[in-house]
Image (cartoon, helix red, strand yellow):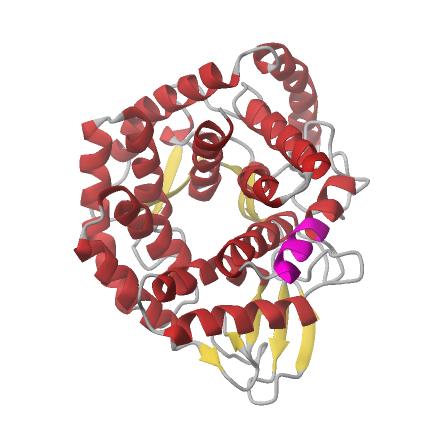
Amino acid sequence: MRRLLFIFSLLLLHQGVADAQTKDLPMAKLIDEQFKFAGQQYKVLAGNVPTDQMPKTFYPQTGKSENSNTGWWCSGFFPGSLLYIYEYTKDADALKEAKARLAILEKEKLNKGTHDLGFMMYCSFGNAYRLFKDPAYKAIIDESAASLSTRYHPGAKVIQSWNSSKAWAGPVIIDNMMNLELLGWVTDQGGDKKYKEIAVNHANSTIKNHFRSDFSSYHVLDYDMKTGDVLQKKTAQGAADSSAWARGQAWGLYGFTVMYRMTKDKQYLEQAKKIAAFMLNDKNMPADLIPYWDYDAPGIPDTYRDASAGAIMASALLELAQYADKKERRRYLDVAEKVIRVLSSDAYRAKLGENGGFLLLHSVGSLPHKSEVDVPLTYADYYFLEALLRYKNWYL
């Protein structure tokens, strides 16, 4: 508890420093500085990761890095981040490293044991194809969609997340909204129409079953995959079954914004706006807009923040602003800009050569499992860089 109070005190101190550091800096200059830093820092990160693995996290208490094989759900974020860095900086070393990591990741296109192929293959090869239009990359994305589609259950009209077990008949997590873009993109690029139909069906089932009346979401729903009946509404990474796990709310916001882009179905736009309203109006949203790890976490304000939830939220709001009316657009942009500025400050961004080579501090993987608590995470970095690029490309 003493350590937690100390961290909280530091965050309050850093918040004031953050405002002074970044509030008057023009966004173009701030974004330029962040990408120059990222280009240097990711050379440090690459040097800490064996060439046949991907970075996972770093533990400042011990000074040890943790890496993963390519089957881990986060394996697409490192090459994706390197491609974002290359896109902005044109650093040939970043591109070389990205291609090397893509090469070891390619085999996961055949992985039918995970629902996370969107994270793994679209955040990586999707960005690679967007930048270079290499048909080989498109073929990998197409095959990844085919693998992901095997986890779809037409009876329940959902993509199963984890495999069935004694605890779960057919678990589906809110995170799965992030894997639908892969399916929709492949259909829109001339692939099988069934992929987008699967994405639409899954999104519709999620709207119907996954959300409470205040538009917060459950983390895990357990389905009877033959009938579509919901057997349980639970959490795995949140504070309680009834709580609003912060990163889960961000996944939903981002996922439904993408579904609107892909379909122009206004129910998805309205869903995204209502999720955003829940997040931004919640009584426990901190002044600096970096959420606590759960909106209903015990001990607020003396508990951990989740920079990854803030980065995902900022990136999603930058896109949602494009589809909103003038008043909503202004609010979404103001929030996203503030989050970017705060994450760019010393309160949340590492110093060069530190933090194991990761960009951001203070993310939370799964506090109930005492896993990756108050550490850097690859997806926090990825969505931070995405938010920076989106702001530059869309609003400058």
In the rendered image, which quarter is residue 316 located in?
Answer: top right
- Is residue 170 found left or right of 286 in the rendered image? left
Q: Residue furthest bottom?
A: 226
Please say whether residue 267 is one of the residues in the magenta stretch: yes
Q: Which residues are magenta?
A: 266-274
Say if residue 297 shows up in the picture. no
- Is residue 248 found left or right of 46 in the rendered image? right
- Is residue 207 found left or right of 89 in the rendered image? right
Q: Residue at x 63, y 10 (%)?
A: 20
Q: Residue at x 47, y 40 (%)?
A: 383
Determine whether 309 is above or below 171 in the image: above
Q: Position of residue 145 (x, y in %)?
A: 34, 67
Q: Residue at x 54, y 18 (%)?
A: 346
Q: Residue at x 47, y 62 (%)?
A: 180
Comparing 345 with 362, the one in front is: 345
Determine whether 153 is above or below 215 in the image: below
- Is residue 257 found left or right of 277 in the rendered image? left
Q: Position of residue 204 (x, y in %)?
A: 61, 70
